[in-house]
Image (cartoon, rainbow, N blue to C red):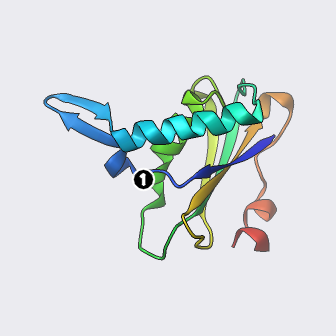
Amino acid sequence: MVTFELPWPPSVNHYYRHVGPRTLISRAGREFRERVARILAGQGLSPAQGRLAVTIEVYPPDRRRRDIDNLLKAVLDACQHGGAFPDDSRIVWLLIHRTQVVRGGRVVVTIRNLANGQQPPNDTAIWSASMN
């Protein structure tokens, strides 16, 4: 199991831009991916192999209403780009959870390699007081 903290990502609404018929990753999206790659390189992570369980804790920067699922694409793509796993199609279990507001916002990603006998969090871990 590995856990790391990342900066607040752009939402999927700002992650892409359209240029004619093409869809490209926006400047904000590219900058986020590069920041994540630097963070992961600094931690010396080896790419997780096999079937993966991923938990993402979302600490929004303010109390505005947000669809937290709009953050998934940027976070998972940046983790893949940064070498946390070779392909996000390896993720077979995914949980995203909003927590308290923190200045600037952040996300905490936990990756469990199910091939190594690790299990996804059980109901007790998901609904514990620390995650509410």
14 left or right, relative to 87: left
SS at mark 1 in the image: helix
Q: Which amino acid lies under the numbered mark 1 shown in the image of this protein?
A: Asn
Q: Where does residue 130 sit, x and y in percent of width and height?
A: 77, 70
Picture quarter containing residue 107?
Answer: bottom right
**Which residue is label 1 attached to?**
70
Does the rendering let one see residue 128? no
Category of crowding for the residue at label 1, using alpha-carbon neighbours closer than 10 angstroms: few (below 14), some (14–19), many (at least 20) = some
Residue displayed at 60% across by 70% down: 102
Say whether residue 39 is visible.
Answer: yes
Quadrant holding the C terminus = bottom right
Tell me the quarter of the image containing the N terminus.
Answer: top right
Image point (76%, 36%), residue name: 43
Q: In this picture, is 56 found above or below 50? A: below
- Residue 72 lies, in percent from the top left, at 50, 47
* Rendered location of residue 28, percent (x, y): 39, 44
Front position in the image: 88 or 46:
46
Q: How many marks?
A: 1
Image vertical order of residue 38 relative to residue 56, above or below: above
- Along the line of sight, the residue nearer the viewer: 46 or 91: 46
